[in-house]
Image (cartoon, rainbow, N blue to C red):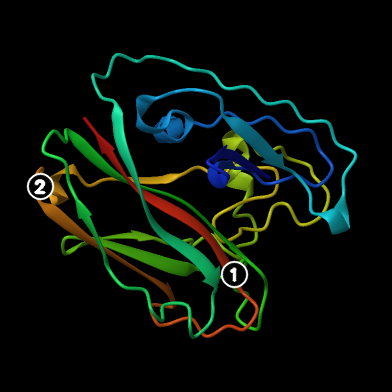
Amino acid sequence: MLLTVRDAGVGHELARFITSYHRETHWVEDISPMLAQLAPGGAGGMRHFRWDFAPPWNTQPTATELSLRLLNKGSGLQVAQLVPLFTGGAFDATYDVGRSPITVQIPTDMKKAELWMLLTGHGNDMYGCAEFCDHQHEFTVNGTTFTVDFPMAATLAGCVSMEWNGMVPNQGGTWWTGRGGWCPGGQVDPHVFDVTTNVQAGSAATISYQGLFQNNPPMGTSANIDLVSYLVIYH
């Protein structure tokens, strides 16, 4: 399931959830950085949301309800900029081909910076990738590397420990088996890294990314990585 908002005809993913095996679910997700997508440039105005639930080839007679809850925690920070970084694709030998580093000019009034991403693996090839394999994803910010991996993938009870994360137990199917970044019926929490000390206000930051399998370039044929990533800048 995807929640997107459309701005000037372009869709931006705000949150991601995984359908359950025939059980009712309930999710609560903190998507605070996505406020920048709701009011680009602070202008506000009307926004159109889209809730993608099931593909045309597998329609489901399921009712869904969505609400947005706004809370001011008094942090003294406001999202000033949401810089798109890297996306995913077919997780094969060409996955990292042509992935050039991205240069971001950091504003002089930057107070905090975060690396923010939604990342899940899908498909099942001869290596179990990318749903049932431990794939690694390395983001490097000005020489410092931040890694996301999924050691619970393909473990027998990897998803049992995630009942607290919105996933309901006693589903049908193999709901208990660990996956590459998600579990049936669970919300996909963003991976967030505080990179404030890795960038400098008023200077350019260089960010690069690569996807790996067993710490080497991916080798599969039918795997897929679903990735959206941003540099979130607060002032």
Q: Would you say 219 lies left or right of 131 here?
A: left
Which residue is at 70% across, 43% downward? 185
Q: Secondary structure at mark 2?
A: loop
Q: Quadrant of residue 233?
A: top left
> Which is in the foreground here, disc 1 or disc 2?
2
Q: Secondary structure at mark 1?
A: strand
Q: Quadrant of the C terminus?
A: top left
The residue singled out by tag 1 in the image is: 224
In the displayed structure, 5 sits above or below 18; it is above
The residue closer to the viewer here, 73 or 127, is: 73
Which residue is at 63% across, 22% downward? 67
The residue singled out by tag 2 in the image is: 200
Q: Amino acid at mark 1?
A: Asn
Q: Quadrant of residue 224?
A: bottom right
Q: Would you say 175 lies left or right of 181 here?
A: right
In the displayed structure, 232 sits above or below 207; it is above
Which residue is at 41% across, 33% downward? 40
Density class for disc 2 (Cα within 10 Å; few <14, some 14-19, many ≥20) is some
Q: Measured from the top left, where is residue 75 in percent x and y? A: 27, 19
Q: CA distance from mark 1 to mark 2?
A: 34 Å
In the displayed structure, 86 sits above or below 106; it is below
Q: Measured from the top left, where is residue 210 in percent x and y? A: 37, 71
Q: Amino acid at mark 2?
A: Gln
